[in-house]
Image (cartoon, helix red, strand yellow):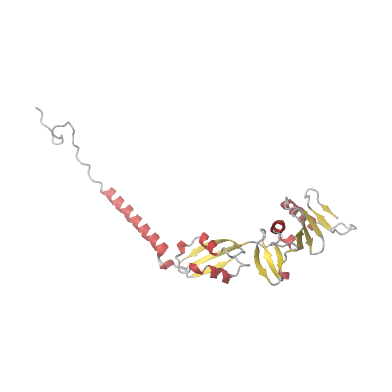
């Protein structure tokens, strides 16, 4: 009868193989990965909760309509928060009551400064409410009350109230929003009786019949070209620019 080898279990034909030798490099790698992960977790905790990066200064740039003081007051609750915990959405939420602010860009500057670049809605017109004048944006929102109307080369929206006729008011502001600044600076008034009958008046007295706010980009290009063209000698001065059909503009 053959002798059973040392690695053959009694009563079986299974050969027991010797255990594989331990790999010291594998152990070291696991220890290194575990240590690195623990370090990263500690570092994240320090960045998110440590007072070392707590905000002490909030610097505001880019604003001309919203005051720096009012912005910093709205952002006062950020004082003491670690810089990595502040996102643009947090800042936007805190500035939601600032009508002139459209968006923000933030930048953290270690150890304690948060820079906030403000992006404001561009004003396209002036409106009057009682004795007060307000700058308004393309969507009709009031951006800021102003004291000196003459300081702004923007048309006054006349005879149309944002409160009484919001749709008509916004139609006018949308029209004005497509005009380049040099053209806006030449306008004195903007008005409309219906959404299809927007009219503009130049500082020099000429009127512009615009019509609806459809194809406004084309109309703006045509009007810009007409205003920049030299008047032929011997021709009567233009009193009306009609761009309601931009493919067939009329002057008279």
Most distant residue in the front direction: 164
Q: Residue at x 66, y 64 (%)?
A: 142
Q: Residue at x 46, y 64 (%)?
A: 83
Most distant residue in the left direction: 1
Most distant residue in the right direction: 234
Tell me if I can see residue 212 in this picture: yes
Q: Position of residue 135 (x, y in %)?
A: 68, 65
Give the number of callouts.
Answer: 0
User: Taking 66 as reference, is 147 left or right?
Assistant: right
**For this rendering, which residue is in front, 46 or 103?**
103
When asked about the image quadrant of residue 119, the answer is bottom right
User: Taking 251 as reference, is 83 left or right?
Assistant: left
**For this rendering, which residue is in front, 191 or 39?**
191
Q: Position of residue 150 (x, y in %)?
A: 73, 70
When asked about the image quadrant of residue 116, the answer is bottom right
Q: Position of residue 92 (x, y in %)?
A: 54, 61
Q: Position of residue 41 (x, y in %)?
A: 37, 58
Q: Residue at x 25, y 49 (%)?
A: 24
Most distant residue in the top direction: 1
User: Taking 110 as reference, is 139 left or right?
Assistant: right
Looking at the image, is 48 positioned above or below residue 2? below
Check the picture and name the quadrant holding the N terminus. Answer: top left
Tell me if I can see residue 186 in this picture: no
User: Taking 42 as reference, is 238 left or right?
Assistant: right
**For this rendering, which residue is in front, 139 or 22?**
139
When asked about the image quadrant of residue 203, the answer is bottom right
Check the picture and name the quadrant holding the C terminus. Answer: bottom right
């Amino acid at each position: 009868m053959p002798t059973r080898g040392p690695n053959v279990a009694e009563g079986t034909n299974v050969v027991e193989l010797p255990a594989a030798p331990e790999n010291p490099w594998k152990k070291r790698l696991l220890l290194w990965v575990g240590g690195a992960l623990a370090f990263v977790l500690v570092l994240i905790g320090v960045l998110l909760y440590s007072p070392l990066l707590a905000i002490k200064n909030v610097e505001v740039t880019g604003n001309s309509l919203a005051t720096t003081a009012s912005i910093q007051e709205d952002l006062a609750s950020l004082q003491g928060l670690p810089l990595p915990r502040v996102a643009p959405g947090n800042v936007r939420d805190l500035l939601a009551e600032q009508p002139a602010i459209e968006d923000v860009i933030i930048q953290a500057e270690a150890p304690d400064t948060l820079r906030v670049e403000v992006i404001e809605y561009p004003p396209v017109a002036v409106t009057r409410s009682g004795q007060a004048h307000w700058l308004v944006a393309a969507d009709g929102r009031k951006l800021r009350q102003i004291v000196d109307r003459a300081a702004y080369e923007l048309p006054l929206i006349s005879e149309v109230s944002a409160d009484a006729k919001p749709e008509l008011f916004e139609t006018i502001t949308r029209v004005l929003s497509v005009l380049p600044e040099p053209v806006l600076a030449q306008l004195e008034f903007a008005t409309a009786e219906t959404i299809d009958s927007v009219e503009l008046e130049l500082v020099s007295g000429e009127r512009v019949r615009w019509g609806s706010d459809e194809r406004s980009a084309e109309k703006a290009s045509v009007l810009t070209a007409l205003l920049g063209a030299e008047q032929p000698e011997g021709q009567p001065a233009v009193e009306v620019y009609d761009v309601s059909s931009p493919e067939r503009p009329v002057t008279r």
